[in-house]
Structures are given as C-alpha cells and as structure tokens.
Amino acid sequence: SIKAIESSNKEDDTMWLTYWVVYGVFCVAESFSDLFLYWFPFYYAGKCLFLVWCMAPVPWNGSQVLYHSIIRPCFLKHHEAVDNMMSDISTKA
C-alpha cells in the first residue's frame, strides 16, 4: 500500500490506501499495548473516535496527518533496507 501511495500514478484511491496503512500500523501498535490500555476508562470510545477521525472525509483527517508526519518519513528513511530484505527473501523462496 505504501508503494502504491508513493507511486507517480495517482489513479488509485490514495485516501483509502493511506487509511489502511495507518490502520495497519495502529493495529500492530495496539496488539502490544492493548493489555495496558483497555484498563483506561473510555478507551474503546476514544479508539472509536480516533478511527472515525482517520476516516473523516476532510483534508485534515487523521490518516493523512499521521501518514505524512510519522509513517512516511519513517518509510522513506528505511525503504531501501526493506526493499533489499524483501528481495533477499524472494530469491531464497
């Protein structure tokens, strides 16, 4: 999905791809922190509001903000290493 977002061909639906990338990162982070977070009052209400903010059809929605401020810089910093690792894995397979 990140490769499709960063591609020069913008015919794909970039808004939803961005949402799914942010949602995937959120799910991975939540799987490690859910043991502690569910004890907080209104955790699930806050989680629901966060996901609605990420899906909101406005230019400042959460998925755009989080992707461009956190996920994209991290990806651009490490994309060559990830590509090399994926290439090595595919040749070994």
Image (tube, rainbow, N blue to C red):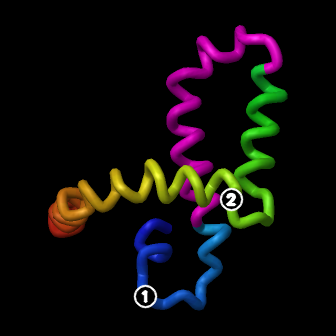
Amino acid type, callout 1:
Ser
Indicate which disc residue 60 carries.
2
Q: Residue furthest front?
A: 60
Task: Give coordinates of residue 45: x percent, y percent.
Answer: 84, 28
Task: Tell me if residue 1 comes above or below residue 67 in the rendering.
Answer: below
Q: Residue at x 58, y 30 (%)?
A: 30
Q: Name the residue under label 1.
A: 8
Task: Tell me if residue 35 comes above or below residue 90 in the rendering.
Answer: above
Q: Residue at x 44, y 52 (%)?
A: 71
Task: Tell me if residue 19 comes above or below residue 29 in the rendering.
Answer: below
Task: Give coordinates of residue 36: x percent, y percent.
Answer: 60, 12
Mark 1 burial class by Cα count in 10 Å: few <14, some 14-19, many 20+: few
Among the 4 quarters of the image, the one containing residue 56: bottom right
Between the C-alphas of marks 2 and 1, the distance is 22 Å
Q: Does the magenta stretch include residue 72?
A: no
Query: Could you say whether the residue bearing mark 1 is in a helix, strand or loop?
Result: loop
Task: Give coordinates of residue 46: x percent, y percent.
Answer: 78, 29
Amino acid type, callout 2:
Trp
Q: Does the magenta stretch include residue 27?
A: yes
Q: Residue furthest top?
A: 39
Task: Tell me if residue 56 comes above or below residue 32 in the rendering.
Answer: below
Instruction: Of the two numbered discs 2 and 1 on the same chain, state the one appearing first in sequence.
Output: 1
Indicate which disc residue 78 carries.
none
Range covered by the magenta-colored residues: 18-42
Query: Could you say whether the residue bearing mark 2 is in a helix, strand or loop?
Result: loop
Mark 2 burial class by Cα count in 10 Å: few <14, some 14-19, many 20+: few
Among the 4 quarters of the image, the one containing residue 90: bottom left
Quadrant where the C terminus lies? Answer: bottom left
